[in-house]
Amino acid sequence: MASSKLLKERIESIQDTMKITNAMYLISSSKLRKARQNYQNVLPYFTRMRDTISRVVPHLPDEPEHPFFHERDLENPKRAYIVLTADKGMAGAYNQNLLKFLREHADQNDRFYVIGQVGYRALFRKDPRLVEDFHYGATAPTLQRARDITVDAIDDFKSGKLDEIYIVYTKIQNALTSEPVMERLLPLDRAHLTPAPKGLGDPRGEVEMFPDAWTVFEQTAPIYMHGMIFGAMTESFCAEQSARMTAMDSATKSAKDMIHDLELEYNRSRQGSITQEITEIIGGAAAVQNNE
């Protein structure tokens, strides 16, 4: 059994750690509220953007095939994955689940464009598929950052460096659970964009596009794609804060349980010391009386 002094030091150390985990829980809770509010504020705009492009696509002629729709017929297409991880750890299995999901779906010839310092450090010098000159943070996602990433992806796709581009991020399923998902960014899927948006009527109805449908599509498609990236970045940030809240709450509860067990052990040790002292005093007194 450990000494009372050592047990007391361990209790004080766990109490200090519990203060940190509780503070991190409160900080993550505050960040989560702000992130959700931000996501809810921008969601209507990007929903309307999707509805708009869904009205434009049915008016596009089948020929010539636009590069954004062109699926290159290659045996080994050059794929790229834009991976959204966190800038900080202590979020449970949030980053580990995402990287595991990525490795399960990627091939040896693919390339990883990682957003977030945790994912970048996990792959740096360990996975040759990581594009090391691609540096973007995951904290406080902004629309401008999403635009920059979209421009880089479109340029590489148009130049032929990449044949397919996917975005891998963590999607919130409900208030308590989230899971990694993968969506294709390029090439676009006509079938995915064709269905009529709710409340907008017939997508093939009379819509005037100036100067023509291709020009309107050229202007709309990049906005739609950086909307997809920004939405994924915002949702991933929400999922990260939710995961960190859950992890810190579990850590705080575990610390309380450990303190409770250590306090019981401390009380037993202290009681044992007191009992031993009393026994020694009684034994000493008895020895004195016998000598007399």
Image: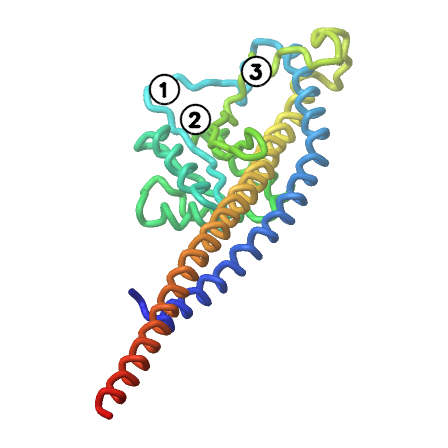
Give the mark, 3 or 1, whose residue is nearer the N terminus: 1
- Taking the image as shown, residue 45 lies to the left or right of residue 22, namely right
Residue at point 70%, 7% (across, down): 204
Residue 210 location (% of width, % of height)? 75, 19
- Taking the image as shown, residue 137 lies to the left or right of residue 161, namely right
Q: Are marks 2 and 3 in contact (CB under 8 Å)?
A: no
- Taking the image as shown, residue 225 lies to the left or right of residue 203, namely left
Tag 2 secondary structure: loop
Q: Which residue is mark 3?
A: 192
Q: Are marks 3 and 1 in contact (CB under 8 Å)?
A: no
Q: Determine which quarter of the picture holds residue 234.
A: top right
Tag 1 secondary structure: loop
Residue at point 76%, 12% (across, down): 207
Q: Is residue 282 above or below residue 123?
A: below
Q: Which residue is mark 2?
A: 163
Q: Residue flagged by tag 2: what amino acid is it?
A: Asp
The disc label shown at residue 226, or none: none
What's the image's color scheme? rainbow
Residue 188 location (% of width, % of height)? 54, 21
Q: Determine which quarter of the picture holds residue 74.
A: top left
Q: Determine which quarter of the picture holds residue 222.
A: top right
The disc label shown at residue 74, or none: 1
Give the mark, 2 or 1, whose residue is nearer the N terminus: 1
Crowding at label 3, few (<14), some or many (≥20) Cα neighbours within 10 Å?
few
Tag 3 secondary structure: helix
Q: Estimate the spatial distance between the alpha carbons at disc 2 and disc 1, rounded to whole Å.
A: 9 Å
Towards the viewer: 15 or 129: 15
